[in-house]
Image (cartoon, helix red, strand yellow):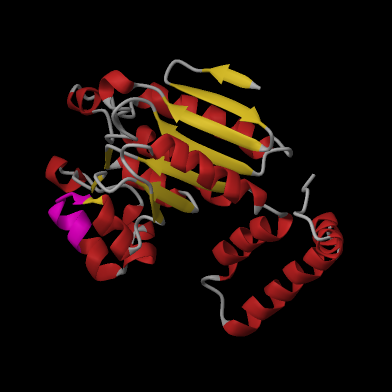
Amino acid sequence: MRIEYPNLTYEARDRIATVTLNRPERLNAQDYPSKWDLKSALVHAAEDERVRLVVFRGAGRAFCSGIDLKELSSRKIDERNFALWEDCLRIIETMDKVAVALVHGYAFGSGVQLAIACDLRISTPTTQFGLPAGREGLLPGLSVWRLAKFVGMGRAKELALLGDPIDGREALRIGLASKLVSDENREAEFDDWVEKIAALSSEGVRATKRAMNELATMDYDTALTAYMGYQRKGLASDDFAEAMLAYREKRAPRWK
């Protein structure tokens, strides 16, 4: 399945859905129509039971350079824009799929926000990550809520309040990036990671994502009860049966 939107492409094949931001002339800056395209693509991915992994890329020289400042300065962006954007990010966070982003070039504002809504962020060493919204008189989205979970409150405040960019190496060091690939061969190296992650995307891995999101704010007793419910479902799942059969047959599991 392939859908060509005005501002992105969506393709689902072999249990992997790929969303490619496609406004290279604007460094994939997100205007209002782009966000509607993204939400539509995400709904397709979330509702497709065959898809286990959702991959995000940016066409051209950048992953996403943030909000479209041309649209913002012309006052075409209001409160509805930010609510729509958060709808998109929440779909990524709560969908029953593993989400991974290849972050290259520039990831400013919305680019950082999109990346941290994903489960894994693979970056190049020279990628520039930044949250300049304060310089525009705005908040950097709900990175004010998400970012500290990755890098700690002190580092999150430094990034959000000062707005100074950091590169991919520093992003990896502080936990903003999960892995690095080379600038020269990023696409091929990222494809290798996608293949590896897809092979691991069992029901157990996806349930782990759901459980980590759900249990993080629970007290121990409540978390234990919820965990045991997830584990019981895992023991009864087709993926667990396939994993045990694969173990006995000394082969890799083949997920449905």
Please say if 38 is above or below 131: above
Where does the image place residue 84, in percent across and percent down from the top left? 43, 35
Residue located 35% across and 62% down the image: 175
| Residue 96 counted in the magenta span | no
- Judged from this view, the residue extending furthest toward the bottom is 221
Please say if 138 is above or below 28: below
Left or right of residue 169, residue 36 in this image: right
Residue located 57% across and 40% down the image: 54
Left or right of residue 163, residue 125 in this image: right
Where does the image place residue 128, in percent across and percent down from the top left? 23, 44
Quadrant the C terminus occupies:
top right
- Image mark count: 0
| Residue 164 counted in the magenta span | yes
Q: Quadrant of residue 189?
A: top left
Where does the image place residue 192, in percent across and percent down from the top left? 52, 43
Would you say residue 171 is visible in this rendering? Answer: yes
| Nearer the observer, 19 or 117 | 19
- The residues colored magenta run 158-166
Where does the image place residue 124, in percent across and percent down from the top left? 32, 45
Quadrant the N terminus occupies:
top right
Residue located 22% across and 50% down the image: 167
| Nearer the observer, 28 or 31 | 28
Residue located 62% across and 65% down the image: 211
Left or right of residue 58, residue 98 in this image: right
Q: Quadrant of residue 14?
A: top right
Would you say residue 89 is visible in this rendering? Answer: no
